Amino acid sequence: MGDYREMWAGLGLDLQAHDALLNALGKGYQDTFLSQKNRPQAMGYFDFVMSEVHGLRIKELLDARADGRKVIGTFCVFVPEELILAADGVSIGLCAGAEFGFGEAEKLLPRNTCSLIKSFFGFKMSRVCPFLEVSDMVVGETTCDGKKKAYETFAQIQSNLYVMEIPQMKNAPDRELLKSEYLRFKAEIEKLTGVTVDAKRLRKGIRTVNEKRRALHRLAALRSTDPAPISGLDALLINQVAFYDDPVRFTASVNKVCDELETRVKKGEGVAPRGTPRILVSGCPMAVPNWKLPAIIESSGGVIVGEESCVGERGNRNLVDESGSTQKALMDAIVDRYFKIDCAIFTPNPDRTEHIESMAKQYKADGVIHYSLQFCQPYTMESFAVEQKLKEHGIPCYRIETDYSQEDIGQIKTRVATFLEMLGQ
Amino acid sequence: MGDYREMWAGLGLDLQAHDALLNALGKGYQDTFLSQKNRPQAMGYFDFVMSEVHGLRIKELLDARADGRKVIGTFCVFVPEELILAADGVSIGLCAGAEFGFGEAEKLLPRNTCSLIKSFFGFKMSRVCPFLEVSDMVVGETTCDGKKKAYETFAQIQSNLYVMEIPQMKNAPDRELLKSEYLRFKAEIEKLTGVTVDAKRLRKGIRTVNEKRRALHRLAALRSTDPAPISGLDALLINQVAFYDDPVRFTASVNKVCDELETRVKKGEGVAPRGTPRILVSGCPMAVPNWKLPAIIESSGGVIVGEESCVGERGNRNLVDESGSTQKALMDAIVDRYFKIDCAIFTPNPDRTEHIESMAKQYKADGVIHYSLQFCQPYTMESFAVEQKLKEHGIPCYRIETDYSQEDIGQIKTRVATFLEMLGQ
């Protein structure tokens, strides 16, 4: 990484704390990713992105701002990137995946708060997140109780916070609510950027995001073969980078990986021997650098073939219909696409279990590991019903509840190994 | 209590488990309520109600059903009793306040679930709740994540469950959502009862509930004097019984207590000496027999002068405007009244802190004890901001997080005693 200390200082970061974070991140990346065998060469791009995630990428964002563009930071896949791009904005994911600054965070939050929330508070309060500092607007949303209420406190330390309401059911009045919230957001983005989002701009934004999603769908489909042509860790990384990177460059880079994977598939090559237990991971999102559970699974003799997650197929499936000719029709198409997201915050949420089942089938998974963050009530509660339904349909499922700490790694390793062994029998 | 064993068996209760529950409840009531000194004589009615809560009251409900009326069980103050009464239904509160059947409940729910939710699961699964069994319809609602997701599982063991959506913000589209949900509920109630809710019936329902609320407001206002004319425990009990009892009989009984309290106030008599530290309790609802924290406060030398709670002033303040002449106008008046409820599920929720402050002033509280149930994210998260705001305005506030267990009573006693001592200085 180049010398960005001046840039970081300019953003108000605590350089010493930030060094500590980057060192830990670098070491974690080395141990988890670079130690893998038989990686696709095209992953080199993503290694580079990760090595420059607080460096070159931040510089790019500052350059974009200098060119008059606005940077919008988001915490949730319900915030439509299409609208941000249509207004010539840059969309950046802000969820954090490291146990950093939790002591600070717990001054403002109950201890019984999930790690993801504590993490973005910790990053902010420890002044180690350049993405937060470079954002012209930060968008929260009323998904879970934890985030919904935490944003009230977060607004005190992040003054440009905007909160979007997400409905809790999937009936007609809920679609109306979501639509009115997207229209309110569009107006806010237009005010911020000074750009009027017309049909042409909207279509362009939709196309860019659809292309990104198509590349991710292509990647997902390639993982259905045995042997798996790419590790779950690398596929997760790509899905994580999707939230940070320039979308056009990202799409091209994913397609490059896919080209290479297609060759592998034709040759019958893979990252793990044919017959390796194939795992579908389902549940809470995993933000960078939360690689704990996938690293355990893949170092214990399993290979992950899909992620039913916001950072994965729940977040990227379904395209927005590009065919509408008016701004109104295109906005409706955006609402239609996002209203399908089967997040556990909805009740009832039968689509999600069906999706897990269809993913297990499509990617030929031998079993599902359901991952929930401790104190995440929507996913933890839903996991009981998910497990029950999957078992009824003959799909083995194992529920794991954990947080960002390293303390339970030994225990999780034992449990994952037992599950993999059971699948192998 | 008479011999209701045949009735309970007919409702499918587990008589042995139910005996155990009633014995514990009876002993708890004896120790907590009947041991108090200088109680108003008119509390005798409430003692009787409590002694017959699973007996005579259940018989009344069965008699009402035999007369063709429907019993609707609810878990939340967002379910408009006015609508139920307008359709000649009987409204019954179902929240449970005892640690009973938690082992069973934890087979279906995460351990990190609040006691209130575990309790109604435990009551159902242990077959000890006659109210659930006598209900023709049980109404859940999407308030917190915990309840919202738990109802999906609960529906598997309580087949007549209906779930109502509650919005999360207080903007125009949210009022629209609430209104459409109330209209959907009205249609459901009409279908269940066979009664068409016209303006006349609606007005009658509104008046009955308004009268009940007026009596509770009268009771609340009387507690502003020093010495306090009634204990916080007895006032809480009245607020709890409000959810179970026949509304007209209840209103008359509350007014009888108030008549007696007015005489006390004139004479300067009270339940605790003048100058006793006066506490406002704020936070999560306390369902029967959850008297743990108030019992600790009042046996430690404090007196509770108000409850900012669903089982208290958050639940009963504001009347529905009775003046509308059409069904439509009256439905709008109902929506207006309920949309004001300042539950912590809303974001932002500044009204609640303002209400706590105004209650502290009105009831001359020396300090506020904020009570949250462990794993209740909305109230626990909001308590940080509440404490901060109250302190800024010179009102001492102490946050307590607990559950239904008895294990932390010693620790809470110490903490409450320290807070009371600090207030006395």
Image (cartoon, coloured by chain):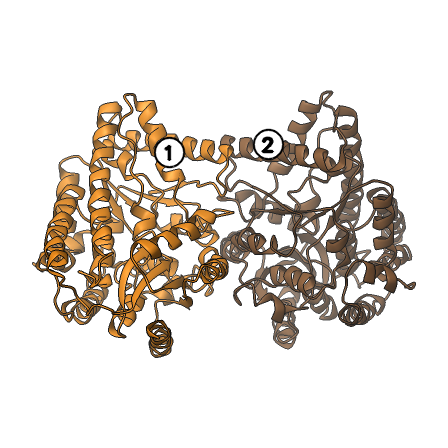
Chain colours: A brown, B orange
Same chain for the residues under marks 2 and 1 in the image: no
Q: Residue B53 location in percent, x, y?
A: 17, 55
- Mark 1 highlights which residue? B335
Q: Amino acid at mark 1?
A: Val
Question: In the image, residue A217 lies at what x, y percent?
Answer: 76, 43
The part of the image, by quadrant, that contains residue A268 is bottom right
Can you identify the residue that label 2 sits on? A179
Q: Position of residue B28 (x, y in %)?
A: 21, 69
Mark 2 and mark 1: span between their CA atoms? 22 Å
Pinpoint the chain carrying mark 1: B
Rendered image quadrant of residue A181: top right
Q: Is residue A262 left or right of residue B254?
A: right
Q: Considering the numbered disc 2 on the image, is that residue within a helix, a strand or a loop?
A: helix
Mark yes or no: residue B407 visible. yes
Residue at image coords 45%, 51%: B344
Q: Secondary structure at mark 1?
A: helix
